Amino acid sequence: MQNGFNMDHHFVSRSHCQKAFARLAQPALEIASGDVVTFETTDEAYERLWRGESPDEIPDEDYNIVTGPVLVRTAEPGDALRIEIVHIHIRRAWAVWIPGYGPLGDLTDELQVRPLPFANGQIAISDRLNVALSPMIGCIGLAPAAGTASTLEPAYPFGGNLDLRELCVGATLLLPVQTSGAWLSIGDLHAAMGAGEPAHISLEAAGEAAVRVTVEKNLQLFAPRILLEDRTLCLSVLDEQGTIEKAAQLATRHAYEFLISEFSLTPFEAYAYVSANVELRFGGPASPIVIAVVPHPVIRS
């Protein structure tokens, strides 16, 4: 057994590390729809800081290295990749405060990097302060139709550095496939993170994430969708040139169309339900991301 799975499940080691989402000459692994894959991730940049390297010595792309890519047979543009998060195991966690970085970076002149002990579902920030261990995947995405896409910023309609705390065990992420094989990569595990990653750095981590990957044929998505037990998150992800207002408009449209397609609501029913029950909130800091949270409606027969 390995992390609760039989040994015949696929495993991709962190030696297959990438600094961009791309379709390569050779994938790290090729799988069939429905397979489970465990991705081992790295925290190399934070270890380098802890060992004394300056932030200026570490390229930006080294902070969000991903593992992969995995080619998924039968996945084609026009399909969606269904990614069920079935297990996350944290091996090491860090608190990192970098001068000048993020909204609180101007409050310190000293680089502070601390490995954090954790046990029994708790992370010790200090001798007197604990927070809950809440593992999640920060960066998960597919290859673009052409070229490469950054693992740091921006995020993309086909995934990337989403930094959404809902990407934890039990969640299912749907991503629109851009190129044959999908080419899935995962990295940037977090041991805990506030919603929206308010400091632009979470409690960063290394470990393993196991996901079940299924091809949803002809599911025409234009943006990520996260399925939870009693609600669905419809995302709008824009590049740096986009605005929060535009992202909010697209997320609301995504929610409206989801209600019609998945619950067979009439256009007026969907409009009124959005008006009454859908919540809009922000996503991670890499891009203008707005999330429309859609509680699943109860339909009377």
Image (spheres, rainbow, N blue to C red):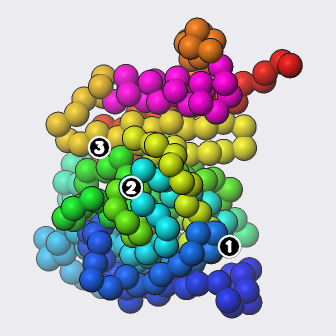
Q: Which of marks 3 and 2 is in front?
A: 2
Give the labeled residue for mark 1: 119
Disc 1 residue crowd, few under 14, some 14–19, many 20+, Cα 10 Å? few
Q: Vertically, is 216 above or below 191?
A: above
Instruction: Using the numbered discs, state the Cα–Cα distance from disc 3 to disc 2 in whole angstroms.
Output: 23 Å
Residue at image x 27%, y 83%?
Answer: 25
Give the labeled residue for mark 3: 287
The reply, left or right, for residue 121 in relation to residue 109 is right
Q: Which of marks 2 and 1 is nearer the N terminus?
A: 2
Residues drawn in magenta: 247-265
The reply, left or right, for residue 26 in relation to residue 140 is left
Instruction: Using the numbered discs, state the Cα–Cα distance from disc 1 to disc 3 in whole angstroms.
Output: 34 Å
The reply, left or right, for residue 2 in relation to residue 182 is right
Residue 210 lies in quadrant: bottom right
Callout 3 amino acid:
Ser
Which quarter of the figure is the N terminus placed in? bottom right
Callout 2 amino acid:
Pro
Residue at image x 68%, y 56%?
Answer: 170
Nearer to me, 246 or 41 = 246
Q: Are marks 2 and 1 in contact (CB under 8 Å)?
A: no
Residue 169 lies in quadrant: bottom right
Residue at image x 55%, y 85%?
Answer: 11
Give how far across and how far down residue 135 sits, in percent: 58, 62
